[in-house]
Each structure stands twice: as structure tokens, then as C-alpha cells.
Amino acid sequence: MKNLLLLITAFTIGCSTVTAQTIRTLKKVLEFKMPKNTGDENAGANGASIVWHSSQNKYYAAMAGNSEFPLAVFDVTGQRLSDDNLTTQIDLRGLWYNPKKDLIYGNGYNDNGWFHYTLDSRGTAMEINIDIAEMKQPNAQSVGTYNSQTNEVLFLNGNQVSLYSNVGSSNGEVKLRPGLTKKDDKGEKFEESTETPEGYNYTTVIYTGIKNAELGLLNNEKTQIELYDLENGFLTTVLKLPESQITYPAFNFSFCNDIYWLFNKETRVWTAYK
């Protein structure tokens, strides 16, 4: 009987481990100051994305909204390496690094298409190259991110994540269940919607590469990042942000180099959390 009770207890704990969500608090580790003052008409307001170029050992941070808005290059300490004149050269939304190609790719607003940058020997000056000159994303404001394991580009589309091959063909969708863990699932029929649930950032999904927590959404109402299982779309991990961190309903949220990034439009600072 004693052995049976031990077995039942172990089974119960095992099941709880599988279904329970992980909750932890993130800590600030770094800050990036984007160039140009907020009063400059060519400075931009929204942070689009940050990428980590592993062979250059540099971060690349871009503003959304205009081809003349800043693109900045930083070292690992947060020191800016590029000058004020470096721009995105395209009205961009998403950026991602492809380690197999050793190139930084991105997607633009609406039908601006997909592109990649060519770097100079210092890794700071950039030439833009258009790869797909048409709209290959769910909507005009979609912010692309990259799954290097499957070679797919991901876009948030309401309560779903649209998957595209690296040449722009549709690879289907992942159905997200915002705020719902597998333990809480009551078997209700999932209803697809192109409207992101209220309180969530509606432009940006991040890809972490963390098993069972690959996809991330920013919950503005609760000031937290929520990670979801790529296979079933259920919430598995909650990452609490400081209450003082400002979040926005669109853009200003990114992930790279195992770090979560939030942009403050007033201070023009990207804050890094781990």
C-alpha cells in the first residue's frame, strides 16, 4: 500500500510539472540609446526590432516608420558603433539574423517586401538588397521574426502565428490561446480571429527557441511576457517585467541573443531583460 501511495504521489507531481505554468521575474541587464533627439522629424517614434549578429558580435537596432529613420549598431556593452547618419533605407517592420547565410534579413511595411543587408568590413555600414518585392505577410504592420530550426519567418496574425518559408510561401499557421494554459483547457472549440486579444501587443510575436515555450507575446495589461508552446499554442511561461517598464500596443518589443527587449518611446532607450 505504501509503495502504491508513493507511486500515485510521484505520478501526480509529474503531471503537475507538465501542466503548471512557470512564473519568474526578469531583471534588467543592458540598455541601448537610439540616436537622434525625439524632436527630430527623422528620428522615428517606434522601435521595430533588434537582432544579434553572432559572427560580428554586434547588435543591430532599427526604428519603424520611414526609410530615413535610424538604424544603430551596438557592441555587447551597449556602446553605439554607428554614426547618426545610418538609416534603415526602407520602411521596415521586422529584422532577423539567418546564421546559415550569415546575413540580416527583414520585412517592410505593407508591400515593401523582404530584404537583406550587406555589411562592410567593419560591420557598420549597410547596403540594402530587396529579395521579395511584394507583400508576403498577414497585414501591413506585421513584424517578422525567424525560426532558424525550421528556416521559417513568423508573423503575428490576431490569435494565430502565420508561418512562411524563407522564400515567402505560406507554411500554415499556429493557433495561439492567449492567457490559457493546457491545464485550464476545457476543450472548447478554438475560434480563429485576425484580431489580437485586448491588452496584448498586436504587431509582434517573438521566437525564443526554448522548448515548449518557443513563441512569445507581450501582455500590456499585466506588464509581462507570455511564452507559448509552438505545438499546441498553450501558455507555459510567464515572465514578469518591472511595473515601471512602459509597454505599447504595437511594436517596441523584440528578442535576440536570449534577451528580451522593450523600447521606451519617450527616452528612446531599448532595455534588455533576462
Image (tube, rainbow, N blue to C red):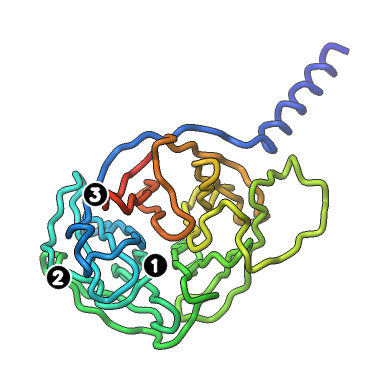
Amino acid type shown at disc 2: Ala
Q: Which residue is mark 3?
A: 32
Task: Tell me which residue sits at (69%, 46%) in the image.
Answer: 180
Give the left or right position of residue 265, taking residue 9 as reference: left
Task: Relative to 24, say whether 197 is above or below.
Answer: below
Residue 229 image offset from top left, x and y in percent: 61, 51
Residue extending furthest toward the right = 1
Q: Decide: few, some or many residues near mark 3? Use Cα within 10 Å; few <14, some 14-19, many ≥20.
A: many
Label placed on residue 125 = 2
Q: Specify the label residue 94 is tagged with.
A: 1
Residue 82 in the image: state x and y as whole percent.
13, 61
- First in residue order: circle 2 vs circle 3: 3
Q: Nearer the viewer, residue 248 or 23?
A: 248
Residue at x 33%, y 50% (from the top left corner): 264
**Could you say whether the residue bearing mark 1 is in a helix, strand or loop?**
strand
Disc nearer the start of the sequence (2/1): 1
At label 3, which amino acid type do we have?
Answer: Phe
Q: Image check: 265 left or right of 208?
A: left
* Above or below, 164 relative to 259: below
Residue 211 in sight here: no
